[in-house]
Image (cartoon, helix red, strand yellow):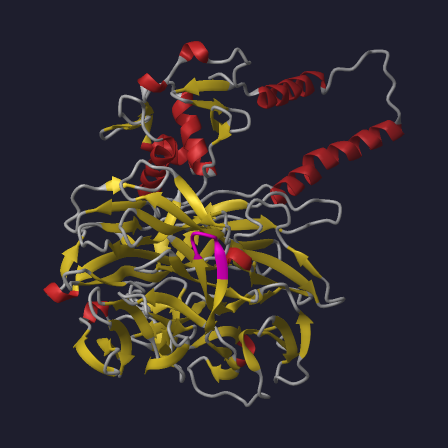
Amino acid sequence: MKQILHFGEYTFEANQMVVMRGIEIIDMPQRQREALSLLLKAEGKTVSRDEFLDTVWKGVVVEEHNLTQTIFMLRKALGKLPNGREYIETVPKKGYRISLGALNQGNSSSSPSWTNSDSDVLDKLRVDFATNRFSQSSHQVVTVKSSLLIGLIALFVFAVVPILGNVYNPKEDLRAVTKLTRDGFGKVNRAPLILNKGMLVFTELRGKKPYLASVSVDGGTIAAAPLNAPNEYISGVRSERGEALISGGDQDGPITAVTLQGRPSRPMAEIFGRSASWSPDGTQIVYVSQQQIMLANSDGQNASVLATPSGTPFWPTWSPNGKSIRFSVHEANDQKSLYEVSLADRSVTPVLKGDPHEHHACCGSWSTDGKYFVYVVDGESSSSIWARREKFLRWKSKGDPWEIAAGPVDFWRSPMLSPDLRHLYAMGVQSRLYFTMLSRNCEPLLRDLSVSSLSVSHDGEWIAYTLHPEGSLWKSRLDGSQRVQLSAPGEFVKFPQWSADDRTLIYIRERNGENTIGRVNAAGGGTRTTVAAIHDVRKIAYAPVGETVAFESQSGGNRLENAIFLLTLGDQKVEPLPGGSGLSSPKWSSDGHYLSAVTNDQSKLKLFDVTSRTWHDVSSSTVIGAQAWDRKKNILYFVEAHDGSYVLMKYLVDGGKTMEIQKMPERYDEDYSSSVLEVTPSGELLFGYSVGENEVYDISVDLS
């Protein structure tokens, strides 16, 4: 295969793995570029599924759906040939091939072909070394000192170099992925998975109540003891005392100690924070309080500030020698990064500085011997587990991190290595999102499509929706017919909203950790534009009259404090909504006179009167879920928690009256099951719900 190849309207530069259309570089993930390279190298011949998995995902645990998803996204990125056919053809039961119609052998550059020159040089060196190793001139004199020097060099070459090579070249011997739990209960994955005396300890949600749970590393029965508060989770274990540290949710709360059976342990000084864990020797506690990393004695006394990063810290973890702490930071634009603070001088340094995943990594842990560090890299629709070999000698670099697992689940969380470095334990999250028509006895909508967000046009004729997990934007009739893709190839989209005249759609465009507002012609085929240079948009609501958009974003750079802002599309003017600080999920009433929102802790539903510019409370609950306005009357529908169950409610603005409509069916009665509730112009109630699992996995590796 040539170094430069033209196919269709594209050019592929092999050495740099760059895809171009004219002078435009096509941005696509590494896996897609590697898959494309393999297809082009085959020059129209079929590439089997096994060949893809062995080459593109070499040494990484994946399932076939990862390949299917990659080919799907690659096709989206390339578009179609002028004759309407795909660039990549499916060969039934065999694999995939590049379309022969796309290949143009006559236009390929005369650059040199791909070679294995590095391997050729090494092979030649091996031959030369074997040939000349023992050849000596009859006139050569070898002194004792020379022999000793040669011997030392040989010792270094044959003994030390291989050792260093093993230290820094990861073994990628992955043998199996085993599911250790199968109980179907949710696992709290904002907290570490902890290995304690052959047992994996974690927090499990049974219904809405948290439990301190454990399972053997060999799998089997899960032991569980209830915790006290709804948001509590285990964040640290001290093996020698059989104690666990309990933190209280995403917000700061009291940190307590309990036995591994869930009973109260010895009293601690009152400290407030989250994500607490003991040092390896059990003499200190690290925890997060507001925006700071805190350090205290093991009994909670003598707390002091260890670090104050720019952003919101979470997930602190101790180095095995107790000399430093690594932690993750939520930064602007939903980015996450890893940092390390030294206990000696309290200096803070980035862990992955200059790495391509520097601002997409979090939630790491060290191996018990300190040789490896494993962490999660989050993508737009999936995540993977990566490992890094820690510095062995001061003059020896750490080497590049490498990917351990990209599947078989959508998202990995809480990775940790076993002491013998032959097992990687992690939580795996797999989910699909579906819609149902509550007002039609829960009849499915868009059957068999996994849909993450949805919006109904004002005339009731069309729906716009985004597919999960790929994030593409589509429109269709309510019955799913006449489907048209509206997003660009490779574009990741969420929360589409129709304009008042149904001619255009705005949506959130996510790219490289930045969320901007995009706009597209609802008829399809038009240009896609960015309507506002705002880089941290969470949710949007298009006013039913005029050209005003309410959107949720950060307030003052504090990730835990979202606020609502108003954007006028005509002049691009942005201003904060009065009293909108600490609120999220804005929704407009049908006449545009009211705007509803939920407090950041999801405990209150509030209503803003646009005329009087005042707020008042609609409802209070432990959890306020999805909300939607009736299309013809000032009636607000919403879901909230009642006595351990979720209930569909409605609020009559004119009379200020709240009433219950129905208890949600049991299959939808899950915490945070959906943030999507829609009402059609004909009065149909559409509800989104999730179907999935969150279990503990054992990934077999060999890093020993």
**Is any atom of residue 292 visible in this view?**
yes
Identified at 68% across, 83% down, the residue is 302
Q: Position of residue 60 (x, y in %)?
A: 44, 43
* Image: 619 above or below 11: below
Q: Foreground residue, 45 or 624?
A: 624
* Image: 564 above or below 20: below
Task: Find the magenta span and give its range.
Answer: 568-574
* Image: 400 above or below 131: below
Q: Foreground residue, 560 or 139?
A: 560
Q: Position of residue 584 (x, y in %)?
A: 41, 68
Q: Is residue 45 left or right of residue 371?
A: left
Q: Foreground residue, 480 or 86?
A: 480
Identified at 41% across, 29% down, the residue is 36
Q: Position of residue 326 (x, y in %)?
A: 61, 62
Q: Residue furthest bottom?
A: 267
* Image: 18 above or below 57: above
Q: Is residue 39 left or right of residue 268?
A: left
Identified at 46% across, 55% down, the residue is 423
Which quadrant of the structure image shows residue 681? Answer: bottom left
Which quadrant of the structure image shows residue 121? Answer: top right
Q: Is residue 162 left or right of residue 91?
A: right
**Is any atom of residue 621 visible in this view?**
no
Magenta stretch contains residue 648: no
Which quadrant of the structure image shows residue 50? Answer: top left
Identified at 34% across, 37% down, the residue is 526
